[in-house]
Image (cartoon, rainbow, N blue to C red):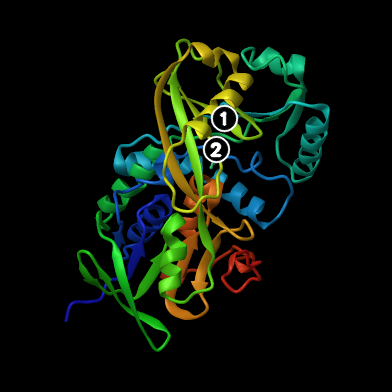
Amino acid sequence: MKKQQDAVIIGGGIIGVSIAYQLAKRGKTVTVLEKDTIGAHASSAAGGMLGAQVEFSEPGPLVELSLRSRSLFPDLQQELYAVSGIDIGLNHAGMLRVAWTEEEGDMLKHRASWQHDLGLRVEWLDRTEVKHIEPAVSDEMNGALYLPDDTQVSAPDLTRAFAVAAVKHGATILERCEVLDIEVADGQITRLSTTQGPFTAEHYVLAAGAWSGRIARKLGLSVSVFPIKGEAFSVLCMPQPIQKTIYSHGCYIVPKSGNRLLVGASSADCGFDERLTLGGLQELMTKAVRLLPALKDCTLEKTWVSLRPQTNDGLPYFGSVSSCKNLLIATGHYRNGILLSPLTGEIIAQMIAGEALDVELAPFSDKRHVPVTS
Ligand code: GLY
C-alpha cells in the first residue's frame, strides 16, 4: 500500500508555502491545497515591511517572535535564491516612523525606551535630523523614530520563492483546489474532500489566512479569525524621492525596485467585502500626499485590495489544536504575515518532524483565553 503523505496544508498563502518549504527541505512529503492561486490574497498585496519594531507599541511575546523571525531573513534570502533563483528583494535601508504632533512623538519615545532596553537599535530624530536623511518627508512632521533594522522585502517574490523552493524540494502545490468538507473520526481528521478529489495525510495544517475561521467552523473549533480589508496602491516616481520606508499612523510608503513606491494601507472590518472603494483610496492618498508631498507628481501605477487575517486578541494561532489530534494551525498573522513567515514555517515543520522546539507557544495556543466579540 502506498505510504500516506506526511502533511497536507490548507492554504497557499505565504504561511502555507513557508511551511511546505520547511517540510519538503526536511524530506517530508507535503501537498499544499490553495483555493485560488499561490499568494493570491494578502501575501502578494503586502508592503513587505519587516516591522518587528514599528508594528508594536508595547513589548510582549509577539514582539519576541517577530524579532526572531526578522533575524532569519538575511540567510533565508541566500538560501531561497540558491534553490529557487528568485531574489526576495531584501532592502536594508530601514524605516522612519513619523510623528505629527509632540504628543505622538512622546508616545514614540516611550517605544524607543523599551526597545532600547531590549537591546534594539532605535533612535528618535527631530524634524531637522529627519529632513537631513530623508529631505522629501513632509515639513509638517514633528520628528520620527529611526528603525534601521526594520527592513523590507518584496512580498510577492518571497511568496513565489518559498513556493518554487518547496516544489524543488519535492512538495506538491495544487491551485484552484478548494476544501469542501473535512471528515473527522475519533478526534482526528480522516479525509479532506476538495474540488480536486479526496486527500489524506498524517498531519493537516490550517493556514488559510482570512478564510481560516470559516474552515475552523467546519471542524467546530473555537478559533476566531476574521478579515480586515486593506486597500493599497503603487506609483512610479523618477527619481525615487525616498530611500527608507516612511510610516505614519494609517499610511506607509515603501520604496521598491523599478522606481516604484508602494503605499498602504486602509484598515476596515467589513467581512469578506473585497471591493476597492474610492473612499478608502481617497483617504489613503490624502494621508500619503501629506506624508510625502512629492507623491503628487508621481504616476499612479495600480491599485489593489486584500483581506488580512485578524484575531480577537490580535495574536496569531500557532501549533497543535487541542480538540483535533492530527491538526496544526498557523494563522491570524494580521499585519505581520510576511515578517513571521520564516519562523512560522520552521515552527510548524519542527512540530511535524518531531524536532525540539525552542519557542514558547502558549500565548499563541488555541487554548488561550481569547475574548469573544459579536
Ligand atoms: N503590514 C502592513 C499592513 O498589513 O498593512
Mark 1 CB within 8 Å of ligand 1: no
Q: Residue at x 47, y 39 (%)?
A: 46
Q: Residues within 10 Å of mark 1 (few under 14, many from 20)?
A: some
Circle 2 sits in a helix, a strand or a loop, which is it?
A: loop
Q: Is residue 301 left or right of residue 297?
A: left
Q: Which residue is mark 1?
A: 283
Q: Residue at x 58, y 19 (%)?
A: 289
Residue 119 at what x, y percent from top left? 74, 42
Mark 2 CB within 8 Å of ligand 1: no
| Marks 2/1: CA–CA distance | 8 Å
Q: Earlier in the sequence, mark 2 or mark 1?
A: 2
Which circle marks residue 312 in the picture?
none
Circle 1 sits in a helix, a strand or a loop, which is it?
A: helix
Q: Is residue 1 visible?
A: yes
Quadrant where the C terminus sits is bottom right
Residue 188 at what x, y percent from top left? 40, 82
Q: Is residue 225 left or right of residue 315?
A: left
Q: Hey, what amino acid is under mark 1? A: Glu
Q: State which quadrant residue 138 falls in.
A: top right
Residue 104 at what x, y percent from top left? 78, 33
- The relative height of residue 331 versus residue 290 in the rendered view (above or below) is below
**Ligand 1 quadrant?**
top right
Q: Residue at x 40, y 41 (%)?
A: 44
Marks 2 and 1 in Cβ contact (< 8 Å): yes
Q: Residue furthest bottom?
A: 186
Q: Which residue is mark 2?
A: 266
Q: Nearer the viewer, residue 319 or 67?
A: 319
Quadrant where the N terminus sits is bottom left
Q: Residue at x 37, y 38 (%)?
A: 157
Residue 82 at what x, y percent from top left? 33, 40
